[in-house]
Image (cartoon, rainbow, N blue to C red):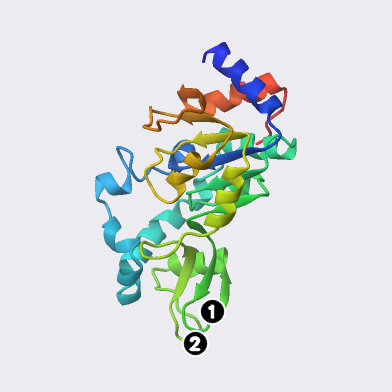
Amino acid sequence: MSNDSINQCVGLILQSKSTIVLTGAGISTSAGIPDFRGPQGLYTSRLYDAEKIFDISCFLKDPKPFYEFAHDFMALESTIKPTATHHALAALEGAGKIKAVITQNIDGLHQKAGSQKILDMHGNFLTSHCLRCRKAYGYHELRSMVLQHVIPHCSCRGIIKPDIVFFGEDVKYYHQALELAQGAQLFFVIGTSCVVYPAASLPQFVPGKIIIVNHSKIDLNMYNIALEVESDIDVFFNELMDALKLPLSF
């Protein structure tokens, strides 16, 4: 990793009084969750029919395909731990260096790592609701049903749906995320190719400087990109935290 990149990033963080972070699937690949659009991802491997399992109209007609995916996802849950980058972002927030994390991910790893101010634009599996009576269910209640290969139903016989955003539904927290982007002096884009809207539109509203950290180059042509790092995300954040003298605890 270039010391120049680390030193430049440290300087930008220390200068900023309002730092916001946007994360995508690339932040969780080292945790064992394939990037949906990566080489082994859902949209590439076609292990599942992504157009069906995440489409709300398909879910309402037949939730079985989604819950087949959810079974496999939840079966991995005990082996999936937050990455060094998740822990770094939580530590940076704890040290007052970042104000909030905006994420497109549904895996809940920012919460597990200890981040407090999180805007899950695509929701997550941590809570669920009955579509008929709106009764709330916790993650472990849903997981117990799903791992038994049961399509989760409420006592009122309504279907239970995790609070994740399906195609055909509005994203969550967009206006709050937009307000944060518009007030950012420094804005990190981490592990996302910025192709999924409306989250992908947020960088264009940033008046401050942008830092991109991703495994591969992304097409984000912005005049205010101060630093673009194409490398292993965890390696970068481990070195960044060392340079900031902020310890990481796992």
Q: Is residue 198 left or right of residue 45?
A: right
Q: Which residue is mark 2?
A: 156
> Which residue occupies 46% across, 48% down?
199
Q: Please name the amino acid that badge 2 sits on.
A: Cys
Q: CA distance from mark 1 to mark 2?
A: 10 Å
- For the C terminus, the quadrant is top right
Q: Residue furthest top?
A: 3
Query: Quick one: label 1, few (<14), some, or many (20+) residues within 10 Å?
Result: some
Residue 158 place in picture, x, y as percent? 45, 82
Residue 113 place in picture, x, y as percent? 63, 44
Front residue of 126 and 3 = 3
Q: Is residue 219 left or right of residue 85?
A: left
Secondary element at image label 1: loop
> Which residue occupies 51% across, 54% down?
121
Query: Which circle marks residue 155 in the picture?
Result: none
> Which residue occupies 49% across, 30% down?
212
Query: Quick one: label 2, few (<14), some, or many (20+) residues within 10 Å?
Result: few
Q: Classify residue 44 by image quadrant.
A: top left
Residue 70 place in picture, x, y as percent? 40, 60
Q: Is residue 91 left or right of residue 194?
A: right
Q: Residue furthest right?
A: 95
Question: As displayed, is residue 226 above or below residue 168?
Answer: above
Q: Which residue is mark 1?
A: 134
Front residue of 208 and 195 = 208
Secondary element at image label 2: loop
> Which residue occupies 49% across, 38% down?
27
Front residue of 37 and 208 = 208
Question: As displayed, is residue 39 above or below residue 112?
Answer: above
Name which of mark 1 and mark 2 comes first in the sequence.
Answer: 1
Residue 178 place in picture, x, y as percent? 55, 50
| Labels 1, 2: front one | 1
Q: Please name the amino acid that badge 1 sits on.
A: Arg
